[in-house]
Image (tube, grey):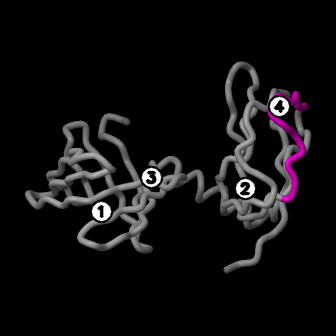
């Protein structure tokens, strides 16, 4: 969070909204300052959002990768909430991947595989974590650069890897 607050990009039913949560608890939505507060309203993911004096109760369940399943007033909707920085990284990765095709995932430096996040056959999106490699006492999340199917994972947890070693290979997926 910076001096102005935290910035998020929220996508609801195809529409994107910039949301800024101020240090004072205020919210800016689409450039408009709003009085907002959010409180947990009970077990099971229940919440109450007070926005400009109007209370909205809802249930939220995290679905992974910034996606949330929201239920309110007998209606279900999926939303995506990303920190502005993460949204920009995903956008850049997708742009580069579109130009370069599907490249294999290579180790950026020597290290140790500490976790395999994806499995062979998984269909992944740009930015999806594939492997976690520890190098120089830091864990590095290695991500897919394009929408693809994981064809082969060439390493296992505990394997030592060398710089530029191919760790995973991908194949194209057909557009829906």
Magenta residues, start to end:
151-162
- Sequence-earlier tag: 2 or 4: 4
79 left or right, relative to 123: left
Horizontal and vertical percent position of residue 109: 82, 31
Q: Secondary structure at mark 3?
A: strand
The C terminus lies in which quarter of the figure?
A: bottom right
List the residue tagged with mark 2.
145
Task: Give the Cα separation between the discs numbered 2 and 4.
Answer: 17 Å
Q: Counting other residues with Cα less than 10 Å from the Cα at mark 1, is it few (<14), some (14-19), or many (20 or more)?
A: few
Q: Nearer the viewer, mark 4 or mark 3?
A: 3
Q: Is residue 25 above or below residue 56?
A: above
Residue under the point 72% across and 36% down: 132
* Among the two numbered marks 3 and 2 on one chain, the one whose residue lies closer to the N terminus: 3
- Residue 48 percent across, percent down from the top left: 20, 53
Residue 43 picture location, percent across and down: 28, 46
Q: Nearer the viewer, residue 11 or 156?
A: 156
Please name the residue shown 36% across and 58% down the image: 18
Mark 1 against mark 2, which lies toward the viewer? 2
Mark closest to the chain's N terminus, 3 or 1: 1
Q: Which mark is residue 30?
A: 1
Above or below residue 112? Residue 67 is below
The residue that mark 3 highlights is 62
Cα–Cα span, label 4 and label 1: 41 Å
125 vs 155, left or right, is left
Q: Secondary structure at mark 4?
A: loop
Pointer 4 and pointer 3: residues touching (CB < 8 Å)?
no
Secondary structure of residue under mark 2: loop
Q: Which mark is residue 109?
A: 4
Q: Earlier along the polypeptide chain: callout 1 or callout 2?
A: 1
């Amino acid at each position: 969070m910076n001096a102005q607050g935290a910035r998020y990009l929220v996508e609801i039913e195809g529409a994107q909204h910039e949301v800024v949560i101020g240090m004072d608890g205020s919210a800016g939505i689409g450039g408009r300052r709003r009085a907002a507060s959010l409180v947990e309203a009970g077990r099971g993911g229940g919440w109450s959002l007070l926005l400009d004096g109007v209370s909205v109760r809802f249930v939220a369940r995290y679905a992974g990768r910034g996606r949330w399943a929201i239920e309110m007033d007998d209606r279900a909707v999926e939303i995506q909430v990303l920190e502005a920085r993460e949204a920009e990284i995903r956008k850049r990765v997708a742009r580069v991947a579109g130009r370069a095709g599907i490249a294999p995932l290579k180790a950026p430096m020597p290290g140790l595989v500490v976790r395999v996040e994806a499995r062979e056959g998984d269909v992944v999106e740009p930015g999806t974590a594939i492997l976690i490699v520890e190098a120089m006492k830091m864990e590095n999340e290695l991500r897919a650069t394009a929408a693809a199917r994981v064809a082969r994972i060439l390493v296992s947890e505990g394997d030592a890897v060398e710089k530029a070693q191919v760790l995973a290979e991908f194949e194209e997926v057909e557009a829906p």
